[in-house]
Image: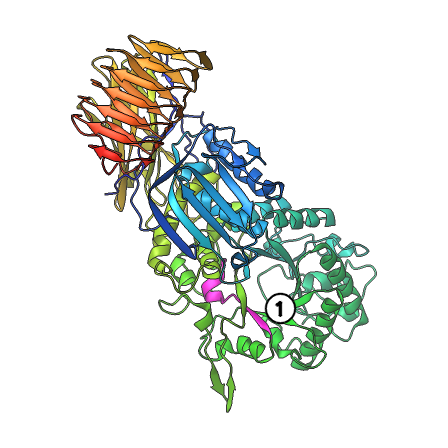
Amino acid sequence: MQTSNRTRGTRARRRLGPMALVVMLAIQAVALTGPAATPALADTAPVTAPQVVPLPAAMEAIPGETFVVGPTTRIVGAEETRAVADALAATMRSSTGYPLPVSTAAPQPGDIALGLTDDADLGDEGYRLDVSGSGIHLEARRPAGLFYGMHTLRQLLPPWIESPTVRPGPWTVSGVRITDTPRYAYRGMMLDIARHFQPPDVVKRVIDQASAYKLNVLHLHVSDDQGFRIAINGRPELTAIGGQFSINNDPGGFWTQAEYVDVVNYAAAHFMTVIPEVDSPGHTNAIVMSYAGPEANPALPDVNCTTRTPPQWNLTGAVGYSAMCPESPNTWAILTDIISQLSAMSAGPYYHLGGDEVPASTLASARYVSFVDQEAQIVKAQGKIAMGWAEISQANFGQPGSPAAVAQFWNNGNPAGSGGDTARRAVQKGMKVVMSPANHSYLDMQQFVGSPLGLSWAGRLDVSQFYNWSGTSSDPATYIPARTTGGVTLPAVTDADILGVEAAMWSETLRTLDDIGFQMFPRLPATAELGWSPQVHPDRNLASFVSRVAGHGLRWQLQGQNFYPSPQVPWRVDVAAPDIATDERTVAGDIASVSTPGATVEQVSATVDWGDGTSSPATLSGTAGTNKTANGIYTATASHTYARNGVYQATITATRPTGSATARFTVVVDTCTSTVSGTHRGPLVVSAGVTCLAGATVSGPVTVRPGGSLIATDAVVQGPVSATGAAMVELIGGSVSGPVTLTGTTGEVEIEGVRISGPLTLTGSTVAAAPVLAGNVVNGPLSCTGNTPPPVNNGQPNTIRGPATGQCKGL
């Protein structure tokens, strides 16, 4: 049973007419399409560490501190922090509905402050994040660190922060101090747009998701046997002929240079470097067909070293049959144009020349070596460092006058045996290595038997294979030990040799963004954690990882991001329910949203406790998952008739075989007799009935007299709040500029997510349900005496600037 560390949110009330209640929340995995209902966030399982992926290098909880994002919260920082501040504000505005202005003013209590520091220990990508009740401070040495810290902050906030529609909170962040730097400088993902063409907007979406997990390299595979995808000035045939198909004769396509530059710039804004790859000398049939095939004009048959003369299109997944000829001057003229233009449009230090899967029967070893040697010199002449698949370690790198190069290891053989030799030989020649073993980092591999997506030649790979590379070890630096063969000892591949890690997404079976997403998540975050997080850390293990990534399922659903609900991940149940205000005693319709990745509606049950001593089941409906899509967020539908008017504290509990979650919501039946919005000038006195403050500002004190009731949601009270003998007092979100004093309340008491500039005192309440004092920031003492039952915080501690005494001690 999952227990609560969140309760009701700061929620605006919906008032219903004579028709039955219909509060639509999102039910689609692709998008949230319903009106902006106001969810109570689900009670969720406590975790030993925040659900942050990748795991930060150092993270310390600060007990008793909780920051509440509210309607007056600002994001402040110097002008050089503006881009990150704007990105954070845009995300949070969509879900909170708060203005969240971005300012260069000095930070004040209640702000989210961003800044740059000279602290060299943070490096170029590290950051420091401090969360307390009075504010959030994020600092880094470079903007990249601010960007990564911003994504950590997003993960510390409730998952509903990812919603594209307003979902009032409370938006709380528990006190924490994080200092974080990456293990490896290179943390990449390769995307193949050659075998199946993808337009720029799809690649931008991939950048959005990959950069959110602190990956900083997009390796873009833009040419293969089936297609050439980037326009090259002076060589229109490369795209007119070479770009017309995709694998299996699916439609082709290509990007203009302007589109390529736009993607490079978009990636840079997300602190990702684009590395273009035009594979050669093999995997070049699209290039060869452009110059030596039947459509070529002029024809340059001397570039063709494929196994067929003349060459022919082969739109299957076959490999090893194509090559360009190293003896042909036309080969080098073509490649020089390609390399020079792609290098000029790519800001990063690397150009990937491919170099894989060229059997000796297609191009003999000496010819292959001469090809790689010559191409690496062309790359060097463009001011780039040559990268290639680890077969390029056969070439003459490490010799006097030879250029620097990086080998990308991808072999899926036994790394202790000959399967690791290409990487060992690269190290022997002084090359750096990017680790991408196919059986642990190829995203195109199937995840289960019978999957319509992916291949299986390197195995069927679930999360555990991506996280643990050798048994229970997840350390790339111990994956390839030293080996002696033929009397020669080849060196181990150690941390000193490893530039970083990369997950590769080949596209033989992937046609759509949803296909790509299904193969990316949750496995890509595993690679991201191997690249970012320190190897030695008590939570740097598979069990911790799957527990943390389990909380990301709802985030992906809210983002419209497809994913595979792997059975290796203990996916969490999340429930959101809106408050209900109705003129009628019958409540009927959609009352909650339920996120439960990987479970069908038949595997989930939901029960509503209506708060009047009765309960009834709810019916779940929504978009079912398929063998290549995750299920959507389900809708819970129920109905109930109350016997009398009043305010009822209801709950909905959703249960699946692996856990459950509960959300609390309030049902107000014909209650608000007066509603205040906008600004009320001067004091406000509630003498009778129920006065509702709906996001209002009161420029004076608020007083509730005996028998009166106050419901304030996101209100700003510029003075104290006092109530004596009130029938009900609810303060949800917002702020009070002065003390809050409640004495002898006879009905519901709830103060949640409120910033109070003074003491909070609760005395002599006699109510059916325990008073709730949760997630508030109290700039003064918290005192509670003589309340029956005593108050609770529902697992959401208050931040108190003073003593907590009496029944409130420990709240």
| Residue 34 seen in the current view | yes
Task: Say which of 310 and 107 sits in front.
Answer: 107
Residue 439 sits inside the magenta stretch: yes
Residue 142 on image: x %, y %: 58, 52
**358 relative to 29, above or below:** below
Q: Is residue 101 magenta?
A: no
Helix, strand or loop for disc 1:
strand
Give residue 84's position: percent from left, percent from top. Answer: 57, 43
Question: What residue is at 47 percent from the left and 15 percent from the top?
Answer: 678
Q: Is residue 403 left or right of residue 604?
A: right
On screen, residue 351 above or below 158: below
The quarter in which the N terminus is drawn is top left
Q: Which residues are magenta?
A: 431-444
Residue to which mark 1 is pinned: 388
- Of residues 267 and 310, the one drawn nearer to the viewer in this rendering: 267
| Residue 173: percent from left, percent from top | 39, 40
Q: How is the image coloured?
A: rainbow
Q: Looking at the image, which residue is at 25% across and 41% down? A: 3
Q: Residues within 10 Å of mark 1 (few under 14, many from 20)?
A: many
Q: Quadrant of residue 736?
A: top left
Q: Residue furthest right?
A: 298
* Residue 583 visible in the current orientation: no
Give the side of residue 186 with respect to residue 624, left or right. Answer: right
Q: Amino acid at mark 1?
A: Gly
Q: Quadrant of the C terminus?
A: top left
Above or below — where is 35 with respect to 390? above
> In the picture provided, is 456 more to the left or to the right than 275?
left
Q: Position of residue 272 (x, y in %)?
A: 59, 53
